[in-house]
Amino acid sequence: MYILSTFGRIATELGAARSRYLTERAISSLPAEVQKDIGWPDMTSRVVYTPGIGSWAGSK
């Protein structure tokens, strides 16, 4: 059962990462004026996800 929950967690993380990537790509394709109007990129509140070996090993 532990293996299935691990695969489920990994699949969830990959889905979330893909969603973030697609959202960033869509917003980055907007004209600079629109990006400025919506405050993109707001580096003060932006969280950068950097996957490492710890995230796959279960230590978060």
Image (tube, rainbow, N blue to C red):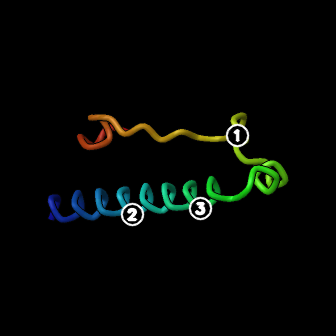
Q: What residue is disc 2 on?
A: 15
Amino acid beneath label 3: Ala
Q: Earlier in the sequence, mark 1 or mark 2?
A: 2
Amino acid beneath label 1: Ser
Q: Secondary structure at mark 2?
A: helix
Residue for point 15% across, 59% down = 3
User: Rounded to the nearest whole Å, what is the CA distance between mark 2 and mark 3?
Assistant: 16 Å
Front residue of 27 and 46: 27
Amino acid beneath label 2: Gly
**Residue found at the far right of this picture:** 37
Residue 36 location in percent, x, y?
Answer: 81, 48
Residue for point 17% across, 59% down = 2
Is residue 40 toward the left or the right of residue 8 in the image? Answer: right
Q: What residue is disc 1 on?
A: 45
Q: What residue is disc 3 on?
A: 26
* Quadrant in the rendering for residue 1: bottom left
Q: Earlier in the sequence, mark 1 or mark 3?
A: 3
Mark 3 crowd level (few <14, some 14–19, many ≥20, 10 Å Cα): few
